[in-house]
Image (cartoon, helix red, strand yellow):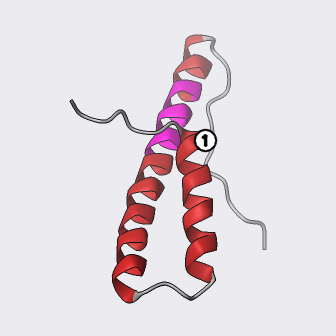
Amino acid sequence: MARKPPSFEEALTELEQLVERMEQGNLPLEESLKLFERGIELTRTCQKSLQDAEQKVQILLEENSLPTLKPFRDEP
């Protein structure tokens, strides 16, 4: 049976823990690579969750005739 992907919060928590472990700098190379791979997977999970949430917000705004979202820009 396939494992259910983690929620956004679970993925973010695990990612933070991985970063903390890797920043200690005392892991063997092979383990560091495995953790890095897992970190990439978790990052993709978080990005997908955020994109899905943004789409839901956009749909709700459109359904209720509210102004749509505009891309965020840093002000100089």
From this view, report whether residue 43 is shown above or below residue 67: below
From this view, report whether residue 2 is shown above or below residue 16: above
Residue in view at x 55 percent, y 12 percent? 63
Mark 1, other Cα within 10 Å: few <14 / some 14–19 / many ≥20? few
Q: Amino acid at mark 1?
A: Glu
Work out which quarter of the rendered image holds the C terminus and state it: bottom right
Q: Position of residue 10 (x, y in %)?
A: 56, 42
Front-most of 66 and 34?
Answer: 34
The residue tagged with tag 1: helix, strand or loop? helix
Residue in view at x 49 percent, y 39 percent? 49
Q: Quadrant of residue 36?
A: bottom left
The residue pinned by badge 1 equals 9
Work out which quarter of the rendered image holds the N terminus and state it: top left
Region of the chain picked out in magenta, as a range: 48-57
Residue in view at x 59 percent, y 73 percent? 21
Q: Position of residue 18 (x, y in %)?
A: 55, 66
How many numbered dots are placed on residues in this image? Answer: 1
Q: Position of residue 4 (x, y in %)?
A: 36, 33
Residue 54 counted in the magenta span: yes
From this view, report whether residue 19 is shown above or below residue 25: above
Q: Position of residue 47 (x, y in %)?
A: 48, 50
From this view, report whether residue 57 is shown above or below residue 35: above
